[in-house]
Image (spheres, grey):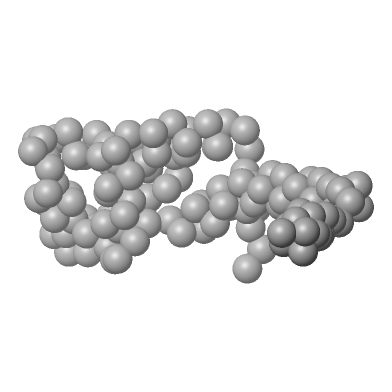
Amino acid sequence: MILSPVSDADLDRAFAALADPVRRAIIARLSRGAATVNELAEPFEISKQAVSKHIQVLELAGLVSRTRDAQRRPVHLEAARLEAMTAWIDRYRLAAEQRFRSLDAVLERSTPPAAPAATTQNTDKEQQS
C-alpha cells in the first residue's frame, strides 16, 4: 500500500490527539475492532459526552472515523493514518540507527585490541613465587 505523505499540520493534530491517555486507550481498544461510544466509554469514569469529545479530537486528527450501521454509529480505527505516522517516525529512526552504526565502525577501527598484558603479568608473578 502506498501511503500519502502526512503534512506537518496533520502530524501536529495526530500527535496532540495521542498526547492524552484516554485517547490513547481508545486507540488501543479500537485496534481490536470497531466499537460504539457506549462500548468505548465503559472502562472510563467519565461521561459518554466526554468520550464523544475525545472521539471528535481523534476524528479531526484522522485517527478514527464513524460509520452508520442502522441505529449504531461504530467508531473505526484509521490504520492508514497510524501507518503514515509510523513511516514518518521511521525515517528519523533509520537515519539515527545509521549514524550509530557508523559510530560503532569508527570506534571499532580506532580502539586497539585488548592486550593480554594483565594475564601475562599474573603468569610472571606466579612463576616468581
Q: Quadrant of residue 3?
A: bottom right
Choose between 33 and 52: the one closer to the eye: 33
Q: Quadrant of residue 45?
A: top left
Choose between 87 and 94: the one closer to the eye: 94
Q: Is residue 113 above or below residue 23?
A: below
Q: Residue at x 77, y 64 (%)?
A: 127
Left or right relative to 10: residue 68: left
Choose between 52 and 110: the one closer to the eye: 110
Q: Residue at x 39, y 34 (%)?
A: 19
Q: Is residue 119 visible?
A: no
Q: Where the C terminus falls, by quadrant?
A: bottom right
| x, y percent for residue 44 | 12, 43
Left or right relative to 28: residue 50: left
Residue farthest to the front?
129
Q: Where the N terminus falls, by quadrant?
A: bottom right
| x, y percent for residue 82 | 49, 53
Q: Is residue 42 visible?
A: yes
Left or right relative to 56: residue 69: left
| x, y percent for residue 123 | 76, 63
| x, y percent for residue 29 | 26, 57
Q: How many marks?
A: 0
Q: Quadrant of residue 74?
A: bottom left
Left or right relative to 81: residue 102: right
Q: Residue at x 33, y 44 (%)?
A: 24
Q: Is residue 97 above or below residue 33?
A: above
Q: Residue at x 45, y 45 (%)?
A: 62
